[in-house]
Image (cartoon, rainbow, N blue to C red):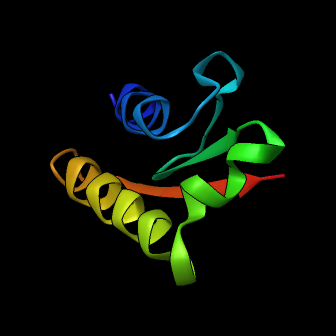
C-alpha cells in the first residue's frame, strides 16, 4: 500500500517517471522504502529545504498508522 502511494506521488512530480524505483525492506514493526529517481529529478522530489520530502513522509506516516506500523522513506541518489 505504502509503496504504491510513494510511486503515485513521485511519478506525478518527476520528468522521467520510468526512472522511479521503490525498494521495500520489511521489518517486524517497521518498513523502509528506498526511493531512487533520475539525478535530474532529485531536487524535485526533495523540494526546497526538504518540504516535499517531508510532506511525502507525513502522508506515509498517516497511511501506515492505520495498520499500526512505522514507515521510513529514504531518498537515495
Residue extending furthest toward the top: 18
Q: How many marks?
A: 0
- Residue 43 locus on image (x, y percent): 66, 60
Task: Give the residue at x 37% y 28%.
Answer: 8
Q: Is residue 27 above or below residue 72?
A: above
- Residue 55 locus on image (x, y percent): 34, 66
Query: Left of 46 or right of it: where is 64?
Result: left
Query: Left of 45 or right of it: where is 37?
Result: right
Q: Is residue 37 above or below residue 46?
A: above
| Near-viewer residue (6 or 70) | 6
Task: Give the residue at x 45% y 52%.
Answer: 29
Task: Give the residue at x 15% y 48%.
Answer: 66
Task: Give the residue at x 22% y 48%.
Answer: 63
| Near-viewer residue (32 or 45) | 45
- Residue 36 locus on image (x, y percent): 73, 39
Q: Quadrant of the N terminus?
A: top left
Q: Is residue 41 above or below residue 4?
A: below
Residue extending furthest toward the bottom: 49
- Image quarter of residue 9: top left
- Residue 2 locus on image (x, y percent): 37, 36
Amino acid at each position: 500500500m505504502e509503496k504504491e502511494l510513494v510511486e503515485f506521488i513521485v511519478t506525478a512530480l518527476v520528468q522521467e517517471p520510468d526512472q522511479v524505483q521503490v525498494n521495500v525492506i520489511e521489518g517486524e514493526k517497521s518498513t523502509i522504502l528506498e526511493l531512487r529517481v533520475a539525478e535530474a529529478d532529485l531536487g524535485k522530489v526533495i523540494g526546497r529545504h526538504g518540504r516535499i520530502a517531508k510532506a511525502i513522509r507525513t502522508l506515509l506516516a498517516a497511511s501506515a498508522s492505520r495498520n499500526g506500523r512505522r514507515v521510513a522513506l529514504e531518498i537515495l541518489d
